[in-house]
Amino acid sequence: MSKVGFIGLGIMGAPMAANLLKGGHELFVLQRKPLPPELVELGAVACASSAEVAQQADVIILMVPDTPQVAEVLFGEGGVAQGLSAGKTVVDMSSISPIETKKFAARINELGCEYLDAPVSGGEVGAKAATLTIMVGGSEAAFNAVKPLFELMGKNITLVGGNGDGQTTKVANQIIVALNIEAVGEALLFASRMGADPGKVRQALMGGFAASRILEVHGERMIKRTFDPGFRIELHQKDLNLALSSARAIGVSLPNTATAQELFNTCSAHGGKAWDHSALVRALEIMANYQIGAKLPE
């Protein structure tokens, strides 16, 4: 049994933490508000600060929204760095800047501790089912030591390379997902406006080379108009901002990623920050003045 710390008990973090407890580990969590009842029942130990979490645990896991929050949790007043001692491991499972990740890792390494960046893909469903894809950057020794914990939270677990490479892989993942959502939205909007049944079109496409998880899951959301968030638009906007800013820093153009970001921006401007990211299609519908599945104009 390991002593594990967990900071960030949101829509993803809470079920991930629960799976660690179910795996038999002692879990120390940062308590900013009442803990989720499941974590209390499973025996999570509440701590008053990130530093206290780091003092109590051997492996400290972060799952917070963005780069500034990771910086604050690690190096702010009462942060993780203040509670670390040599030999401990920090694992950041948030999705943040690859460039800043390398800086964070260097600072933690200076304290005699290991650092892994290990962002995830799979959403709330994957977090609850412990089927997340986990993309890891860091040393092989640290990865092997922490892998049993990863296996309680995910299925497809890959050590990609050194620090920052996990975050780079996650950004690449989010580019692909956004562009696939856009492609599925355009295809279903086109088919529906042409007079075809979008549900039947999706069914046919699922049997061919265009089949994908995005077409399967988000295509259905677009047709049924079920945009309750599994992954919020505002979070995907954050990820594409990371992609575009990192690309600028290395002189790479990502024109289609920029277009997808503009479509997300349109959704946000229409009150959609908390919509599921599949609702990107609503920006396309606004431009077309037509909604998938709607009766065709006379």
Image: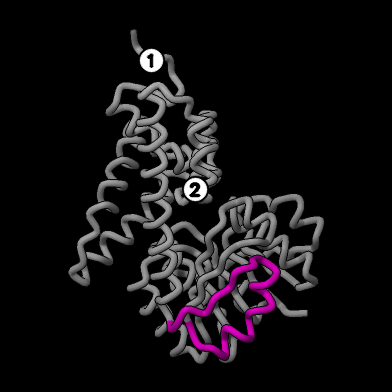
Q: Mark 2 points at which residue?
A: 208
Classify residue 40 by image quadrant.
Answer: bottom right
Vertical comparison of 253 with 4: above or below: above
Instruction: Verify CB contact (< 8 Å) between mark 2 and mark 1.
Output: no
Vertical comparison of 57 with 295: above or below: below
Image quadrant occupied by the C terminus: top left
Residue 142, magenta (yes or no): yes
For label 1, count other residues whose C-alpha is less than 10 Å away and answer few (under 14), some (14-19) or many (20+).
few
x 56%, y 82%: residue: 84
Question: Residue 268 at x, y = what percent?
Answer: 35, 37
Element type at marker 1? Answer: loop
Residue range (magenta): 138-162
Image quadrant occupied by the N terminus: bottom right
Amino acid found under the numbered disc labelled 2? Gly
Q: What mark, if any, has residue 267 been given in the picture?
A: none
- Between marks 2 and 1 in the image, the one whose residue lies nearer the viewer: 2
Q: Mark 1 points at which residue?
A: 296
Near-viewer residue (124 or 292)? 292
- Mark 2 / mark 1, whichever is N-terminal: 2
Which residue is the extreme one toward the left?
251
Give left or right: position of 3 versus 209: right
x 54%, y 78%: residue: 90
Q: How far apart are marks 2 and 1 (CA)?
A: 27 Å
